[in-house]
Amino acid sequence: GYALFYLKGVAPPEISTGDIYWGAFPFWRLMELGLIACIIWPQTILWLANTLVK
């Protein structure tokens, strides 16, 4: 979102917006995998929350 345009503003002119998108792509994939893991195994998150409350 906004970080893309900020990075485009501070990056050298030879760096394109597409380069910035592709640079961030692996991190988006990691976040998607984490979200999928949370959907498949929600008991892991609930276990941690219950442990912290005790």
Image (cartoon, grey):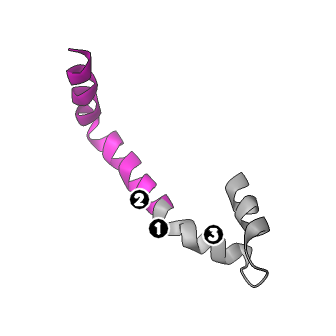
- Magenta: predominant secondary structure element? helix
What is the magenta range?
A: 28-54
Can you identify the residue that label 3 sits on? 21
Give residue 15's quadrant in the image: bottom right
| Vertical comparison of 54 with 9: above or below | above
Mark toward the start of the polypeptide (2 vs 3): 3
Viewer-closest of 12 and 54: 12
The location of residue 9, given as percent across then percent down, is: 79, 66
In space, the residues marked 1 and 2 are separated at their CA atoms by 6 Å
The answer to whether residue 16 is magenta is no
Identity of the residue drawn at 23% across and 20% down: 50
Q: Secondary structure at mark 1?
A: helix
In space, the residues marked 1 and 3 are separated at their CA atoms by 10 Å
Q: Which mark is residue 30?
A: 2
In space, the residues marked 2 and 3 are separated at their CA atoms by 15 Å
The amino acid type found where label 2 is placed reads Leu
Residue 22 appears left or right of 52: right
The N terminus - image quarter: bottom right
